[in-house]
């Protein structure tokens, strides 16, 4: 028995009301985000009601927030329970706040340093052990290993290259010139990582963000040492330097625009 469709909307009407195309609504249905109120068995014509229209608008809003198809579908499958979506958005807000802080220093004229406590997100990466102490040595090692990861066919992450340094001189208020071990780390996509990939879990960390040419890197380290002492913090891991804007990120970038984030995991 055919359903009375007088109070329902055809696909073109629903799409127009939402400012979308007919094909967009069809894709939503294919991805499990939308089920028409009624589909005519003979013609296959789709009809929508007010609930459908409101849902389409919600889906579009969630997509604009950066949520994935799977996350949105799970929200509706859980009856609108939003704690999972909230956790995802809070994590993205932290990432956005980090990005704003970085951009603020990049936009400033002259070198700048910013200090804060932060939640360092988990990262999956490939690593190579090296030894040295100069910025030039680390830069060359990072560039070489980055190229090897590309040639190996690794699926790289958009997280910045970083290095993990086995040093403690900065905690005593000095900078030594003695070579020390460090690890060049290239982030990769977790779901497509090589068997040799490692993962560092999310942790609490003290961050010193520095923008400027590398002549000010020592002051970045000394600032970290002073802040650890002043805040009474206890290190819980080796320091990492995230190379946000560095020689490998572009030939055209001026050295005064380089940006590095020194992070030290600390006990909660």
Image: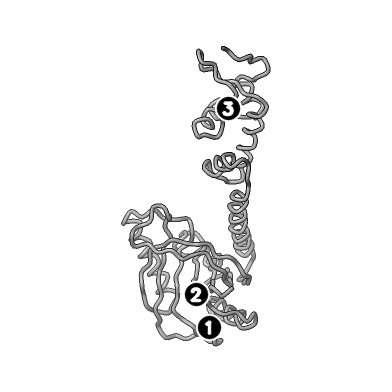
Work out whether mark 3 precedes mark 2 in sequence or the reverse, and give the earlier one.
3
**x, y (%) of residue 83?**
62, 50
Residue, disc 3 = 21
Q: Secondary structure under badge 3?
A: loop
Which of the two marks, 2 or 1, is nearer to us in this view? Answer: 2
Q: CA distance from mark 2 to mark 1?
A: 10 Å
Measuring 49% from the left and 66% from the top, which residue is drawn there? 243
Q: Looking at the rendering, which quadrant does residue 256 occupy?
A: bottom right
Measuring 64% from the left and 79% from the top, which residue is drawn there? 231
**x, y (%) of residue 101?**
63, 62
Is disc 2 in contact with disc 1, using a CB cutoff of under 8 Å? yes
Q: CA distance from mark 3 to mark 2?
A: 50 Å
Q: Secondary structure under badge 2?
A: loop
Measuring 54% from the left and 87% from the top, which residue is drawn there? 172
Q: Quadrant of the C terminus?
A: bottom right
Compared with 72, 267 (above or below) is below
**x, y (%) of residue 255?**
52, 67
Model colouring: one colour
Q: Secondary structure under badge 1?
A: helix
Work out whether mark 1 precedes mark 3 in sequence or the reverse, and give the earlier one.
3
Residue 65's disc number: none
Residue 239's disc number: 2
Compared with 118, 15 (above or below) is above
Residue, disc 1 = 170
User: Residue 117 versus residue 107: which sits nearer the camera?
Assistant: 117
Q: CA distance from mark 1 to mark 3?
A: 59 Å
């Amino acid at each position: 028995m055919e359903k009375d469709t007088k109070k329902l909307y055809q696909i073109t009407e629903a799409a127009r009301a939402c400012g979308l195309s007919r094909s967009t609504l069809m894709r939503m249905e294919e991805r499990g985000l939308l089920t028409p109120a009624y589909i005519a068995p003979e013609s296959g014509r789709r009809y929508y009601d007010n609930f459908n229209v409101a849902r389409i608008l919600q889906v579009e809003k969630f997509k604009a927030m950066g949520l994935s198809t799977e996350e949105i579908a799970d929200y509706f499958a859980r009856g609108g329970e939003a704690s999972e979506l909230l956790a995802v958005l809070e994590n993205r807000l932290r990432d956005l706040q980090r990005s704003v802080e970085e951009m603020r220093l990049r936009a400033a004229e002259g070198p700048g340093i910013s200090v804060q406590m932060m939640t360092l997100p988990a990262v999956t990466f490939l690593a190579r052990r090296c030894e040295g102490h100069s910025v030039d040595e680390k830069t060359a090692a990072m560039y070489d290993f980055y190229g090897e990861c590309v040639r190996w066919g690794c699926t790289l992450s958009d997280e910045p290259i970083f290095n993990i340094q086995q040093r403690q001189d900065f905690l005593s208020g000095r900078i030594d010139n003695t070579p020390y071990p460090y690890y060049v780390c290239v982030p990769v996509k977790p779901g497509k990582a090589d068997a040799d990939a490692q993962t560092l879990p999310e942790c609490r960390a003290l961050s010193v963000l520095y923008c400027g040419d590398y002549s000010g890197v020592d002051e970045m380290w000394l600032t970290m040492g002073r802040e650890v002492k002043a805040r009474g913090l206890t290190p819980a891991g080796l320091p990492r330097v995230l190379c946000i804007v560095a020689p490998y990120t572009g030939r055209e970038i001026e050295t005064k625009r380089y940006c590095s984030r020194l992070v030290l995991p600390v006990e909660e």
